[in-house]
Image (tube, grey):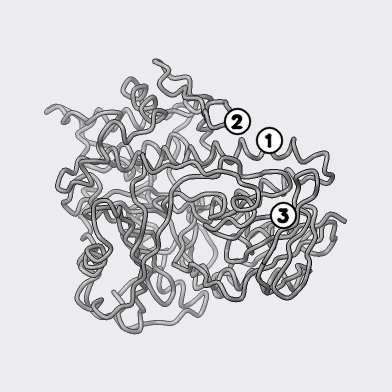
Amino acid sequence: MRRVLIVGGGSAGWMTAAYLNGALNDRGNAPTVKISLIESPDIPRISVGEATVPSIQHVLSVAGLDETEFMKAADATFKQSIRYQNWLHNDQSFYHHPFSRYRIQPIDRTGRAWLNSDRSVPFMETVSAQPVICDMARAPKMLGRWDMGAPLAYAYHMNAQKFADYLRDFSTARGVSHYLENVTDVEMRENGLIKSVRTDRGNVHEADIFVDCTGFRARLIGETLGVGYEDYSQWLMCDQAVVGRIPYDEFYPGLIRPYTTATALSSGWAWDIPMQDQRSVGYVHSSHFISAEEAEREWRAYEGPHAKDIETRLIKFHVGQRQKAWQGNCLAIGLAGGFIEPLESTGLYLSDLGAVMLAEHFPYTDDMLEAMAFRVNRVISNRYFEILDFINMHYCLSRRTDTAFWQEVQKPERITDRLKAKFEYWKLKPPSASDFQDQSFPGGAGQIDRVVPGCDPRSPVDTAGLWNHESYEAIMYGMHFCGEPLAPPSPDAPKTRVMPAIIERLRAAQVKLPPHDMWLQRALGAPSFTSAGYEPPGWAPGRARPY
């Protein structure tokens, strides 16, 4: 029986264990691979509120988790969108990047139609009901049987530490072995593969496949195997975050938002992630433009006077990826493999991607290792570059000039060459699905080879594995750009049209979709709280809809 040893726990380690056990062992019912996980009892976990993307539902399904039980255990809430505020201008304006939208068949011309209209309605609200449903603070599910047509896509917000603990108990009950020990040494085979790890308890754990989930330390892939790290800080300048939690029993704003809020601040942005009993608020910022003390003061100003006694902590990070996620018989998953700031909630996604790739390309013999690693490295590397471009776009499309940080991130040298090539092409036409077949755009600006020794020399390809042309439209038109600043609408431009199906769905939602907090209380038994009658100063007010 093939042996897998996951070194490191947390959400990355236990997601990997649960997924591999589900995919390879039929959730423990038909074991073909022995899965073990070793984690330190002494290293504190980086635990903040986490937001996810809809792919998390695939992981839960394969592992065999029940949605209701998972949401109860992880204090989870629904996430239907990310609401971006103050990104275009520092004026409390906002737009949504939702998970559901209508697709016009057989040809979708909604982007061009919006560009040619008076743009009196934000683009995403012309093709999706979800932005308004989010601002109404409604759940994406009914309390009874669903009868509103196509279901609304959603992901979750959750307490990452509770999620990891739930996955641990779930996995060990289904055959995954668990060891609480500190790794002290790594023993290698003569052929350059890892043979075993030794621990402070004198135990030796041998395996055929090792998964490095040791966080930024990268104990196996970095320290032992010497795989280097590609730095992305030229294009993503934020390198640390001030993080704190706002408990509802002390301060409840009167609702639980069914979306993640990302608010641009002076030197970065703040996440605002609602869970069942608290909110996680973190200010991701660049230490080159603001000190940790100044960032903490700005964090407290975002939250309001009641935050003066809230405990915060500073998390430092380095954006980039391993030059190879898989080296020999070791695959790095989670922070050991890389990190991109969580503006589009890709932290847990990259962990579940690693687990899915390992299951799909599992090397049942050592002679499969090289071929499987080559393919997995290509897929994971492409996905990192896709995420890099997409996150980079949020910054470079801003028109803010009120601080040095926002002036800097718009400079040409802060924009990736692949993204520049996309923008040049999309000056000529709106984004479409075929744009992601390869990166051979006119002018060839995107054809940049990776010159890192030992790495795949081929140019990265944005395969739209996570975000397609519709997501690009959501951000570009939300930021009033299409490769360059949009000219004002012409005086005789037609009124922006909202599809009748969206208006009908919004009418139904007002009647049939319960408030998010009500759904959580009735469906999950979540606690209820008394409103403090006060919203954080950093929350932008809603807006009236002209339809």
In the image, residue 411 lies at what x, y percent? Answer: 25, 34
Looking at the image, is mark 2 or mark 3 earlier in the sequence?
Answer: 3
Looking at the image, is mark 1 or mark 2 earlier in the sequence?
Answer: 1
Badge 3 marks a residue whose secondary structure is: strand
Q: Residues within 10 Å of mark 2 (few under 14, many from 20)?
A: some
Q: Nearer the viewer, residue 380 or 207?
A: 207
Q: Nearer the viewer, residue 135 or 451?
A: 451
State the separation of the CA atoms marked 1 and 3: 16 Å
Q: Nearer the viewer, residue 459 or 432?
A: 459
Q: Looking at the rendering, which quadrant does residue 16 occupy? A: bottom right
Badge 2 marks a residue whose secondary structure is: loop
Badge 1 marks a residue whose secondary structure is: helix
Q: Residue at x 44, y 28 (%)?
A: 432
Q: Amino acid at mark 3?
A: Phe
In the image, residue 224 lies at what x, y percent? Answer: 65, 52
Q: Amino acid at mark 1?
A: Phe
Q: Residue at x 23, y 78 (%)?
A: 308
Looking at the image, is mark 1 or mark 3 earlier in the sequence?
Answer: 3
| Residue position for label 2 | 456
| Residue position for label 1 | 374
Q: Nearer the viewer, residue 225 or 306?
A: 225
| Residue position for label 3 | 210
Q: Residue at x 59, y 33 (%)?
A: 455
Q: Amino acid at mark 2?
A: Asp
- Residue 152: which disc? none
Q: Residues within 10 Å of mark 3 (few under 14, many from 20)?
A: many
